[in-house]
Structures are given as C-alpha cells and as structure tokens.
Image (cartoon, rainbow, N blue to C red):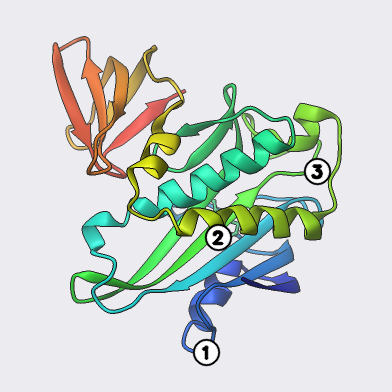
Amino acid sequence: MQILWLDTIDSTNSEALRRLPELPSATVLAAREQTAGRGQRGNTWFTEAGKNLTFSIVLKWDPGAFPVQDAHWLNYLSSYAVLQFLAEHGVSAQVKWPNDIYVGRRKICGMLVENSLNGSSLAASVVGIGLNVNQMVFPQLANATSMAVCTGNTLDLEPALQELVALFERNLSLLFDPKLFQAYSADLFQKGIRARYHDLLTDREYTGVIQGVEADGRLRIRDLDASIDHLYRFKEVGYIL
Ligand code: BTN
C-alpha cells in the first residue's frame, strides 16, 4: 500500500472521498494534523496534532465482489489489524462491537468506514482510523487512552503506520475467511458480563449480556430484564458506560 502523508487536512476521510476518483486502490492518506476529524454519528474526532495516527485507507472493489450485506467484514479487517498492532507493542485491547478498540474501559481507537455503492455491491470503501499513540492527556474526553499512557513508551508515527498498514494488508487476504471472523470476535468488550444497554429501536434501556457476534455481523445481547435475545445491526444499540 502507498502511504501519502499530509501535514494538515480537515479530515483524512473527507480528503479521501474528495480524491476518490483519482486515488488508486490501497492508497493510505495520513495526516499529521486533522482540523475537523469526523467520528461516528456526526461527532468530532479530537486528537492532538502530531501525536496520534489519523489515516484513511482507500479500497476499490471489483464489480460484484463485495456484497453490501457483507460490509461488516471491513470492521473485522481493520479492528483485528489494530488489535494485532497493539499486541505487538504490549497493549492488550478488545473490540467494542462493531469497531471501537478499548483498553479496559477506555477507548484507544475509533473507526469511520464510508462506502460507495454500485447496485448492491461496494464500489469503494474509505476506512478511517484514529489510533491514539503518543497523546498523554485528553482534555475533551473522559474515557480516552493512548498507547503511551498504557506502556510509558512513545512511537515514531511513520514507521508505526507502515507496520499497522502491513497488518491490514495481510488481513485483506483473509477477507471472508472464517479465521478472520474468529480472530475479531474472540475477545469482545463486555462479552459475558452484565452491563446496561440502550435499545435504540425501542428507546428502552435494559441489563444484558453480550453473547457474541453472529456470522452476519449482528451483535447478540441476552436481555436479562425481558428474558429474550436481541440481534442488533450497527447503530441499533448503544452501550451505557
Ligand atoms: C469514532 O470512533 O467515532 C470514529 C473516529 C474515526 C476517526 C478517524 S481519524 C482518521 C479518519 N478521518 C476522520 O475524519 N475520521 C477518521
């Protein structure tokens, strides 16, 4: 993959989407500083300039090769690459379904995947990843952490990104392979633990236990209040932390 470093940009995802027609597949746009980083649900992604990895991977798919209902495999690819990278640097982390990465109860990495469609298949994907590497304090964020906070060590961002991208590329060859799904879902945040959840479909809060991720990417939570299981797609359930 080719990595292009930008000094300052509003958002690497926005830039990747703007430049999508001209960028070859497997290009990585990385920014030393993002001035308007974007998170899930229209949130801002806060990150200190020059301290963390903020980058977007552009992928273009052959026509019909990637059915839209399999789009959750992009979360498997990227989440597992980040878990592997963190493990190699002494940080033990978990996936908070679908694609947040947590160390204990603190978030170390967030992802924003944006797809363009051709009929019922993906045409292109922009996988945006914000990984906290060297930042030590998080003024706007109560539950954030970084690799440096966890290990006491700082990393050079450019070689770190090369390493992480190489892991992502290796996982690309495991796309749709059950081994990748297993690796992704082996150790989910809050799996098997009683916790509070917010069902966004019914606007109801309950105590439940995550059972795991289904083959179709949905999260199964056992509702202890109603004695039933729920299966959720992305954005249908919230964690009450
Ligand atoms: C989230 O957890 O809310 C998702 C955060 C995604 C942040 C990354 S940083 C690189 C890329 N560019 C953006 O504007 N957002 C993603």
Residue at left offset 46%, top offset 51%: 77
**Residue 65 horizontal/vertical position (percent):** 28, 70
Find residue 232 and report its horizontal and vertical position in percent. 23, 36
- Element assignment for label 1: loop
Within 10 Å of the Cα at label 3, are there few (<14), some (14-19), or many (20+) other Cα atoms? Answer: many
- Whether label 1 lies within 8 Å of ligand 1 gets the answer no
> Upstream in the sequence, badge 3 or badge 2?
3
Q: Earlier in the sequence, mark 3 or mark 1?
A: 1
Which residue bears the numbered disc 2? 169
Residue drawn 60% across and 68% down? Answer: 12
Q: Amino acid at mark 2?
A: Glu
Q: Check disc 1 and give the amino acid type.
A: Glu
Q: In percent of the image, x 35 and y 49: which residue is there?
A: 177
| Horizontal side of residue 204 vs 33, given as left or right | left
Tell me the quarter of the picture where residue 10 sits: bottom right
C-alpha gap between disc 1 and disc 2 = 21 Å
Number of marks: 3
The answer to the question of whether label 1 and label 2 lie on touching residues, with beta carbons closer than 8 A, is no
Looking at the rendering, in which quadrant would you find the N terminus?
bottom right
Judge the density around disc 2: few (<14), some (14-19), many (≥20) Cα neighbours within 10 Å. some
Of residues 155 and 144, which is closer to you in this image?
A: 155
Amino acid type, label 3:
Asn
- Give the CA separation, mark 3 to mark 2: 24 Å
* Residue occupying the far bottom of the picture: 22
Q: Is residue 24 left or right of residue 192?
A: right
Query: Mark 2 or mark 1, which is nearer the start of the sequence?
Result: 1
What residue is shown with label 3?
A: 134
Residue at the spot 43% in from the left edge and 38% down from the top edge: 184
Give the quarter the ligand 1 occupies.
Answer: bottom right
Residue occupied by mark 1: 22
Q: Is residue 165 above or below residue 197?
A: below
